[in-house]
Image (cartoon, helix red, strand yellow):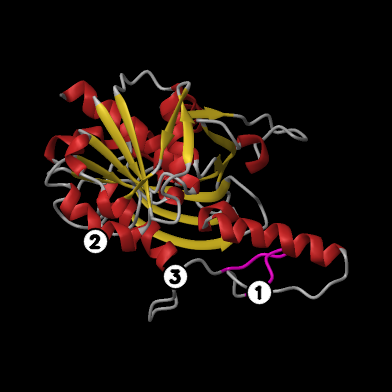
Amino acid sequence: MNFAIIGASGNVGRKTIEILEKSKLAIDNLFLIASSKSAGNKIKFRNKEIEIEDLENYNFSRAQITFFAAGSKVAKEWVPKAAKETIVIDNSSYFRMQKDVPLVVPEVNSEALNKHKNIIANPNCSTMQMVLPLKPLHDEYKIKRVIVSTYQAVSGAGKDPMDELFDQSRDYLDGKKIKLINFTKQIAFNLIPHIDSFDQDGYTKEELKMTNETKKILDNEIDVSATCVRVPVRTGHSESINIEFDNLYDFENIIKILKNAPGCKVIDERSDGGYMTPLEAEGSYTTYISRIRKDNSNIKAINLWVVSDNLLKGAALNTVQIAECLMKKL
């Protein structure tokens, strides 16, 4: 089969190429597409250099499956056109909440792929790593409410914000004036409780994405409250999650369920360093679960610490896993 990547020169596009390089997918041809600014550049894939093509001139019928890794603006314009010729797996937020577009995490709701109409949406990175441990817990005990606080790396905002973190860190240590370009506040040696734009109720779009996407993927009856924070970390999102169930639970069974959660690994030694950090999760396909505790204020609730590489499972890896699921169904 032939595959294509729209936005091949960006952070997620390049990660998608890396994952496809290691995957067992039988790829006859891989077409790399980007804006005219990147067209003509070459990227190596499986011992062959592939020249990036201009999106404006690309013929979507050349690939059976096309990954979009170019943002909502590009998705809005080009995905409907592409979907007439190819199956689209879109990384942007544009189609996620559309009723006829499946929002898929393969370990959680791969059955949703049975109803796709050539457009499949990839969830938000922070939602994705959260629903992985939530799914088996919900199957066993039925989740009533989730309260989550995220600590999200700058790579989730793109290459320019990553560069800004590095530049600000250098300037801060050199005693120079800090320049704000992509962030509303200094990000170096700081935290910013603001990701995406605010709505009228004071929540940001990132927080609402976590709420709405979790409901669509898992269960519309689950209540979700999120606070999303940008932190001076290069790659890897972290989440502190409080989960309240409808009924009482068996704590040892909770541990057993989480240890068997697909795509996850429990690292929880209850000792100095016996937990995972975003730095350690960088480059790993696994979502890590640590700090598993009973909620001492609520006998029906537990607390988790969840860490994952937001460019891998939070974006590129999940799209490739969706493609692998599709291949099994074809």
Crowding around mark 3 (Cα neighbors within 10 Å: few <14, some 14 to 19, many 20+) is some
Residue on which the image places disc 3: 204
Residue 15 in the image: above or below residue 252? below
User: Residue 267, image x and y in percent?
Assistant: 61, 29
| Residue at numbered disc 2 | 77
Secondary structure of the residue carrying numbered label 2: helix
Left or right of residue 290, residue 109 in this image: left
Q: Which residues are magenta?
A: 185-193
Mark 2 vs 3, N-terminal side: 2
Q: Closer to the camera: disc 1 or disc 2?
A: 2
Judge whether residue 216 can be spotted in this image.
yes
Q: Amino acid at mark 3?
A: Thr
* Amino acid beneath label 1: Leu
Of 186 and 110, nearer the camera is 186
Element type at mark 1: loop
Cα–Cα span, label 2 and label 3: 25 Å
